[in-house]
Amino acid sequence: MLKRFTLITLILAAFTVTHAQNKIKPNRDTTELKPVIIKGYLSDQPVISVPASVSVLNAAQLRIQPDNSFVNALNTVPGVRTEERSPGSYRLSIRGSLLRSPFGVRDVKIYFDDIPLTDAGGNSYLNAIDIAAIQKVEILKGPDGSLFGANSGGVVILSPLNRYNDSTYISAGINGGSYGLFHEKAAVQLKTTNYLLNINQSFQTYHGYRQNSDTHRNYLQLADSWNYSGKNTLKALGIYSDLAYQTPGGLNLAQYTVNPRLARQPTATLPGAIQQRIGITTKMYLGGLTNEYHFNDHIRNVLAVFGNHVDFANPFITNYEQRSENTYGFRTYFELTGDKKPNLNWKVDLGFEWQQTNSHIANYGNKKGVKDTTQTVDYIHTNQHFVFARYAADVYKRLHIEAAVSLNDYGYDFKNLYPLNQNNFTNRNFSAQLMPRLALSYQFINALAWRASVSRGYSSPTTAEVRPTDNIVNTSLQAQYGWNYETGFRLRNSDRNFYA
């Protein structure tokens, strides 16, 4: 009797629930994701209408990837190749090879907000940055020298602030993994009506798979934003990074077959990686101020002044290299915006960027990780600057047209302090280069747009190529250049959670 009663009760309950579900229609979820916005082209712009190949990794996308390295996040972007040859040692290319980047990041211009992370000598210490403190990454593929100066690969813009999270908060986290991975991070953000302060701190260590592959990094990042007198904003940005990592070196096939975890082995004439304690330490201080001032509804100016100091040391198999690098510069542009009309919106930008990097590079003998006798000491002063202009227009909110051009100057001075003890600098200037870009996009419907562009790329030799570890200054090196033509379609769904 009890079994029959239970069965009847369950049937009636199921019928009642089903009947209720049929009568009560659930509310439709009307949540719509915020549009993907980029600011790389000097002002905010929906990515659907950008007439360039652009990829955006927002805060949510970055958080679903491991936050111990840039490699996993950047390699989700088509056309981007990121490698970590040993823990802490990055290589990066956009639509190209890594021939010019056997060590470090070259031929790609990287900005930390409005401040160049890439120095005047063309080197970018991307491995000094903790990706856990970055809220957004914009990747502009292909040469964009018309606005950002010499580069052939593309531009990467790192944003320290999340435009969609302007509340006050405190966060902290710890994660770990195999091979001694430990990553501690903490962040605090204070938000008032006109003021925002964001501070990130982290420590990371990781031993790696092979012998002599160990890394640790202490990192501190500050972003301070003050909105004064309406639309005007003053930002202060700062980074302190203390990075050290070992490099295991290469193996031949026989050594790899015996044990792939070995470090570079000694030979009859040269010691190995462990004996020489080869590795790299990089201590970087970077700071800058950015002011955005609106003269009226049609004219605004953005001015950024910045500087950084890098202490670099690399005990290697054959020598011990030390570098002291000081970079300073500024970037500014004026923007004139026309009256908004139903059939035409336009703006004109005119700007200038200037950078100077002074490098003191010395090589010594390496005696088991300790500096030995002096081999050579050089000064290299590198300067690059460019003026740029851009016109952009939206016609009937469907056709977007951009025309931009920059005039680029690059050169370096060098002199040998030891053993030649030269008194005067030798000058090596490159001829000024014009880098135009013409692009357009047409939005057929809200979800589909077509784009096309033509641009000229130009990339001067970096300081690390001009003066490599063989202690020879290669004044015969030339810049690389070429033309880039492309076209494509961009598609999104109505909820803006799918792009192709």
Image (cartoon, rainbow, N blue to C red):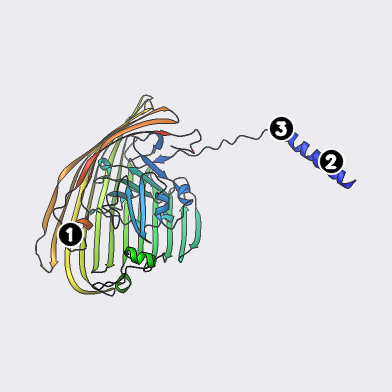
C-alpha distance separating marks 2 and 1:
90 Å
At label 1, which amino acid type do we have?
Ile
At label 3, which amino acid type do we have?
Asn
Callout 2 crowding tier (Cα within 10 Å): few <14, some 14–19, many ≥20: few
Q: Quadrant of residue 334?
A: top left
Secondary structure of residue under mark 2: helix
Decide which of tag 1 and tag 3 comes sooner along the chain: 3
> Of discs 2 and 1, which sits in the foreground?
2
C-alpha distance separating marks 1 and 3:
78 Å
Q: Residue 417 location, x and y as percent?
A: 13, 67
At label 2, which amino acid type do we have?
Ile
Whether residue 156 appears in this view of the structure is yes
Whether residue 214 appears in this view of the structure is no
> Of discs 1 and 3, which sits in the foreground?
3
Nearest to the observer: residue 319 or residue 190 = 319
- Please give left or right for residue 460 compared with residue 214 in the image: left
Decide which of tag 3 and tag 2 comes sooner along the chain: 2
Residue at the disc numbered 1: 380
Q: Residue 483 location, x and y as percent?
A: 24, 38
Q: Quadrant of the N terminus?
A: top right
